[in-house]
Amino acid sequence: MRGPPIETWLPPAGAVVLLLLWEGSVRAFGISAFVLPPPTAVARSLWTGLSNGVYLQHALLTATEALGGFVLALAAGVVLGALIAEVRWLEKALYPLLVALQAMPKVALAPLVIIWLGYGINSKIVLAGLLGFFPILINTIAGLKSCDAGKVDVMRALGAGRWQTFRWVKLPNALPFVFAGINVAASFVVLGAVTGEFLGAKEGLGTLILLANNELDTAQIFSILLMLGLLGFVLYSAVRFAQRRLLAWAPAENLPST
C-alpha cells in the first residue's frame, strides 16, 4: 500500500519545521519578545483573544466588510467588464481611464473614501471593493475578448442573436478568466477592509492591530495577523470550491494561472 503523496504531507511538515526553527532561534539567540515573540507566546495570545471572544467579535466585522467588498467588486467587475468587452465605443471611452486608475495605488484613495463615506462600515466595504474590482474587471475583459472568432461566426450562421452568442459561447469561455480574477480579489478585499480600519474605525481586526501596536504587544500583533490570514484563506478556499464546481468541464491545464 502506498502512503500519501508528498504534496499532502510536505506543507504541514514544512510549517512544523519552520515553527521549531523560529522557537529555537528566539530562545538560542535571546531575541527580545518585543522584536520577535516565540510561537508559544503568539499561541497564548491567540488563545486568550479567542477564549474571551474579542477576536471573534472583531473578526466578524472585518469579515463582513471584506465579504461586502467582495460582492461589490464581483458585481461591478463582471458587469462593467462585459459592457466594455461588448460595446466598442464604451471600451474606447472608459478603458484608458480604467488603466490609469489601475496604475494608481488604491490605498492612496482611502482617505478620500473615508471623507466621503465616513468612518462606518460603508467606507470599509467600498475600499475592499476597490481593491478587488480591478482584477475581476481586467480578467473579465480578457476572457470575453479571447473567445474564438470561429465559434462566434458559427453561432451567427445558425441565426443566434447577440445575447445568445454571449450567453452560450462568450460567457463560458470567459469564466476561467473571471475566476482567476476572483481568486486574486479574494485576498485583496481583506487588505482593503483592514486598510480602512487602520485609517479610522472603532472595531475590526485592523483596529486591534493598532491597539496592540500602541501597547507594544508584538505577540498580539502576530496572533491578529494569523486571524487575518485565516480569514483570507477561508474566502479564497470558498472561491476555489465554487470554481471546481462551476468549471468542472474545464481542463486544469487550460485554466489561466492566478
Image (cartoon, rainbow, N blue to C red):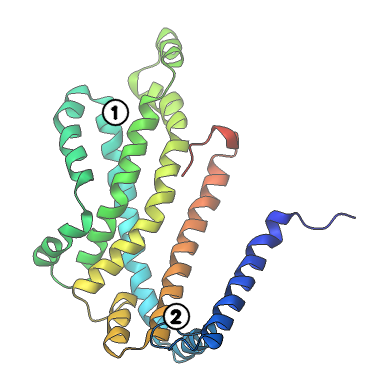
Instruction: Decide if residue 98 is on the left or right side of residue 138.
Output: left
- Which residue is pictured at 29% across the width and 45% down the height? 134
Instruction: Write down the quadrant of residue 138 in the picture.
Output: top left
Front-lying residue, 95 or 119: 95
Q: What element carries label 2?
A: helix
Looking at the image, which residue is at 44% across and 50% down? 183
Give the image location of residue 25, x and y in percent: 55, 81
Task: Establish if 59 lies above or below 94.
Answer: below
The amino acid beneath tag 2 is Ser
Instruction: Give the mark count.
Output: 2
As helix, strand or loop, the secondary structure at mark 1 comes to: helix
Give the position of the N terminus as an image quadrant: bottom right
Q: Which residue is the site of mark 1?
A: 85
Residue 240 visible in the current orientation: yes
Give the amino acid type for the residue marked by disc 1 in the picture.
Answer: Ala
Residue furthest right as drawn = 1
Check the image and report above or below for 55 versus 191.
Answer: below
Mark 1 or 2, nearer chain start:
1
Q: Callout 2: few (<14), some (14-19), or many (20+) C-alpha neighbours within 10 Å?
A: many
Q: Nearer the viewer, residue 42 or 127?
A: 42
Instruction: Find residue 101 and report its horizontal and vertical position in percent.
Output: 18, 44
